[in-house]
Image (cartoon, grey):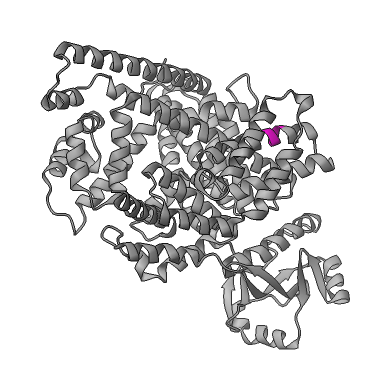
Amino acid sequence: MAEERLLNGQRYFISKLLEFFDVSSHQLPVFYKALQDKRYDSIILMFNEFLDIEREIREGTSDKTKLKHSMNSSLKSIKYHCKNNPWALKGDLSRDIDYLIKEIEKFQTNEEKQKDYTRIRLAISSITKRSDSDSLIKDYIELLLKSPLSYKEIDLFVQYFFSEIINLGYSMKYLIEWKQQYKELNKFTNHLSKKELQDKLFLFKELVKEPSSYLIIINSWLPDELKDELYKDENITIKYRYCKIDADKEKLVTDQANKLNYPKAEQYQNLIVEVIAYDKYKAIEKVVKNLESYLEMYKHHYSFDKKAINVNCLLKSNEDVWEKMRTDNVDTQIFNKSMSDRENEDIRDFILLRDKVRIDEGKINTSINQLNNSLETLRKSIDDSPENRLLNNWSSLEYILNSYEGKSIIGKVIDIVPKVICMYHVKDQLNILWENLSKYKGSKDYKEVEIIESLFQLCSRDKGKYDKISFVNFLSSEKKLRELYDCLEGNVVIHREIAYIRDILLNVKRLKENVMTLHELIEHDLTRIYRLRNKLVHSDNNISFNSDIFTIRLNKYINSLIGTLIHYLKRQPNLHISEVLNSIHETYKWYIDFLEKEDIKEKELKEKEKKRKGKDQSSDMSEELEEKLYVDIATAAYPPYLYL
């Protein structure tokens, strides 16, 4: 039994992890959904963020009051993730992590004047020296090979594992290409043997390697000051050494002039730079982003409104062959498609709403203007740099929440946004299950199964959608759920989804716990995004990792909120945004209270039923009790908003 649980866990881990590596047309929605819901970030990155903030406090380089707020929120996140990360709980450093958690808790209970970060700083600093992203990835694999883990633990494992891969310094583009070169990773995990599963897991260890050296030739506009420095010193050192190219390299550029299309104006210079990176796309990004950021002030000063660095470059890796590459950010193209598609949906809905209000009322009201500003900011951010895109997404969120009174901006954000997501949590899980069942039913491998045919016959609506009440009622039957679960034994992903649906639909207490856990997780996520936003504002947009990993989540939060606002304003156009925001706040409080009361009611009714039937229950009677619903499951799944 333990062996089968171990192997099923490995199958599930591989299947879920590969969702982050596949952008083929049929898998694209799954890929974006995986990124949007990835809220468990690299624990090593969190440790290093804390050390950076603590160093700034000691050095007195910034506003200490604001930094201490950042420090406290950073510690809250670290404590939360240390209590949830399976490696932190079961790995070789579990004792150290447990002690760190106790130190953080002691620190949090101390009065302000007694607070001292020293012990925590030394503990975290020591842990990061013992365990970096490289070693953590290996530890995760070893734990998966040895420890039978629950689906819930593996869901966390997948996100933490992928986060450490990204934290190493890989580009998304490279990871997608890496997966494509291994045909064995494309095989379904359903019937793989223990050895085959082990071999698949070991493939991911290959990503733990020494970074490579790359030579890159770029063509860039330079102001006179930097051009003079280049002629005098043969290089310009701006983090990396951008060197003047020699005659051989100049000939190389000349030979490929038609392909490279470099301008011949004196203000443009050919530069060669060596950089260490995990892949060629990341190497180019480092070199280009660093120089462009430095040139930004010069561009303002000289009113230079073009792109400083040419879109084409030459790159040489260990293979000793020069290849033509592009300098634009390839990961941005991957992330941006998702955001623009979703934004277009919201824009279409908003246009209908705006026209209706304009025609009915003869003018555009304040709420419509607020939404217009927010959507316009989102739309403009599509063409921005990754850093500016995150800043503009945050500004878009601020536009919407301006009318919500009584709190700081981060206070407003963490008060409203998690509640919107949490009240749609059951619906979101039902959507995922329906989509995957529909995909399975339409696959070439599907052979007619009675319970699946029955589900679609009873629950289907037009255009491939489901009737929400019929679907909830169907899945609220323990017997039908078990039958569905058993017939899909070979599909570990749908297996997990059914198990989770059962957990939250047939156990109100568990639903409440999961909703509150999700709320806390989103609070931590939004606080981290806000810290990143502040860092971008104060660091001239110069960060080492791809901020789009955070922006894609922020974008989902914004679109969920905008979608909710549009939905209720379409039904009642004279509503103010502040009234809908107030409803979100009040409805969530009511919803948690409702789940609490339903849980108590369920326990009391079950107890009465048992007493009425007598102590000696037959197995049939036990099944009857399981089949009987004691709670208002439809309201638990789809809470109606107050006042609207």
Query: Looking at the rendering, which quadrant does residue 225 occupy?
Result: bottom right
Look at the image and tell me in which quarter the C terminus lies.
top left
Of 26 and 344, nearer the camera is 26
Answer above or below: position of 79 versus 128: above
The foreground one among 551 and 192 is: 192
Residue 600 can be seen in this image: yes
Q: Which residues are magenta?
A: 69-73
Residue 72 among those drawn in magenta: yes
Magenta span: predominant SS is helix
Does residue 220 appear to the left or right of 14 in the view shown? right
Please name the residue shown 76% across and 71% down the image.
242
Q: Nearer the viewer, residue 188 or 446?
A: 188
User: Residue 94 colored magenta?
Assistant: no
Residue 603 higher or lower than 223, as above or below: above
| Res 312 → quadrant | bottom right
Numbered marks: total? 0
Q: Is residue 448 found left or right of 392 in the rendered image?
A: left
Q: Position of residue 265 (x, y in %)?
A: 75, 75
Given residues 17 and 25, the one toward you in this image is 17
Query: In the drawing, does residue 642 fall left or right of residue 187?
Result: right
Residue 158, percent across and down? 45, 50
Residue 232, placed above or below residue 62: below
